[in-house]
């Protein structure tokens, strides 16, 4: 996959961006998607829109304190949503069993992947959110 770049002028465009991202994920052999961006860039908001696009009917929220939430997509497959912001060490994340999640073949959506960089598989998608205005974002999607 070549790098893809999307610009969203405001939150109203998020469903379209999520649809495009879902298509890239569906065409990709990667099951781990790493979402990078500063605090408030919209990682969880994008994950929520992506999950809606995938048919998740659960309330999608940041798993900051639980570190991982499990949802089901429209076909009943697991979707794992991680937030490693509060992880102190990679060992802490490893004890959670992240390797088993990442190796499961099911979709793993990872916020704050830099905190567990050594645990991420070599073959994952990276989605970088860059704040360009009060509601505008630039998304860059690349293979890691």
Image: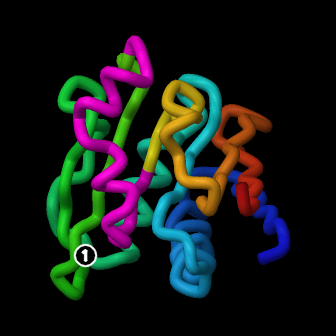
Determine whether 76 is above or below 6 in the image.
below
Label 1 sits on residue: 73
Residue 136 location, x and y as percent?
Answer: 71, 45
Place of residue 140 in the rendered image (x, y in percent of width and height, measured from the top left): 76, 55
Which of the two residues, 63 or 7, is positioned nearer the viewer here?
63
State how the image is colored.
rainbow
Residues 36 and 103: in front is: 103
The N terminus - image quarter: bottom right
Tell me if 66 is positioned left or right of 141 in this view: left
Q: Residue at x 23, y 83 (%)?
A: 74
Residue at x-position 76% and y-position 63%: 6
Choose between 14 and 118: the one closer to the eye. 118
> Is residue 90 highlighted in magenta?
yes
Q: Is residue 58 left or right of residue 114?
A: left
The residue at the point 49 percent across, 39 percent down is: 119
Tell whether 136 sits left or right of 32.
Answer: right
Highlighted range, magenta: 88-109
Residue drawn at x 19%, y 61% as measured from the top left: 71
The stretch drawn in magenta includes residue 17: no
Identify the residue at the far top of this view.
88
Horizontal side, residue 1 vs residue 76: left or right: right
Identify the secondary structure beneath mark 1.
loop
Q: Is residue 61 above or below residue 11?
A: above
Count of residue discs: 1
Is 90 placed above or below 72 here?
A: above
Picture coordinates of residue 55 (x, y %)? 28, 78
Q: Quadrant of the C terminus?
A: bottom right
Instruction: For label 1, count other residues whose C-alpha is less than 10 Å away and answer few (under 14), some (14-19) or many (20+).
Output: some
x and y percentages locating residue 87 in the rendered image: 37, 19
């Amino acid at each position: 996959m070549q790098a893809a770049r999307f610009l969203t002028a405001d939150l109203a465009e998020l469903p379209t961006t999520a649809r495009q991202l879902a298509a890239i994920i569906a065409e990709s052999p990667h099951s781990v998607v790493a979402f990078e961006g500063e605090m408030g860039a919209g990682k969880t908001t994008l994950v929520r829109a992506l999950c809606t696009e995938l048919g998740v009917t659960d309330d999608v929220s940041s798993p900051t304190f639980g570190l991982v939430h499990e949802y089901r997509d429209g076909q009943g497959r697991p979707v794992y949503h991680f937030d490693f912001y509060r992880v102190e060490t990679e060992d802490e994340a490893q004890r959670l069993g992240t390797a088993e999640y990442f190796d499961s073949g099911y979709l793993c959506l990872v916020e704050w992947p830099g905190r567990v960089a050594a645990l991420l598989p070599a073959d994952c998608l990276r989605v970088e959110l860059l704040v360009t205005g009060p509601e505008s974002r630039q998304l860059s999607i690349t293979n890691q």
